Amino acid sequence: MKLTTLKKRSEFLRIRGGARCPTPPFVLETKPRDGLPSGTQEPRFGFTVTKAIGGAVERNRIRRRLKAAVAAVAEAAARPGHDYVLIARKSALEISFDSLKKDLERAFHRVHHAPAAKPRSKPT
């Protein structure tokens, strides 16, 4: 699957405050796009790997691993008309690729099927 990626900072910032799922190797954030022209329904992806994670070689390797995992999983798990941002963590470099894909599948499921908030019980 060919990935359509987010390029502009404003596109990344728009997704802040949407559905979010933290995992050990990354954080997945998503938000549906509003006012879509026809033909732009495919999901778009953004990848954030900060300098705190390591040098350029490590950051690029993590980005490539995340892109490969998204390409493998997105067709079945990503929803059309949504934008996604993956914020990498250091462990994305160390875990197995199969574990990375499983975490990504779980994260896609969680952001689209958010658990209902539990009602708080009143103290007696």
Image: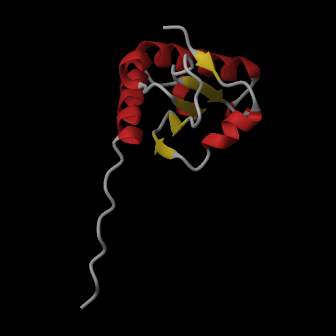
Look at 59% across and 24% down and name the residue there: 37
- On the image, the x and y values in percent for residue 17 come to 58, 50
Look at 57% across and 20% down and name the residue there: 40
Look at 67% across and 36% down and name the residue there: 12
Looking at the image, residue 29 sits to the left or right of residue 63; the answer is left
Residue farthest top in this picture: 1
**Quarter-of-image position of residue 63:** top right
**Quarter-of-image position of residue 97:** top left
Residue toward you, 86 or 34: 34
- On the image, the x and y values in percent for residue 95 come to 46, 24
Residue toward you, 119 or 82: 82
Looking at the image, residue 63 sits to the left or right of residue 20; the answer is right
- On the image, the x and y values in percent for residue 38 come to 55, 20
- On the image, the x and y values in percent for residue 61 come to 63, 16
Q: Eyeballing the image, is 98 above or below 48?
A: above
Residue farthest front in this picture: 38
**Quarter-of-image position of residue 109:** top left
Residue toward you, 26 or 16: 16
Look at 50% across and 28% down and name the residue there: 81
Q: Eyeballing the image, is 124 above or below 81?
A: below
Q: Eyeballing the image, is 64 above or below 25?
A: above
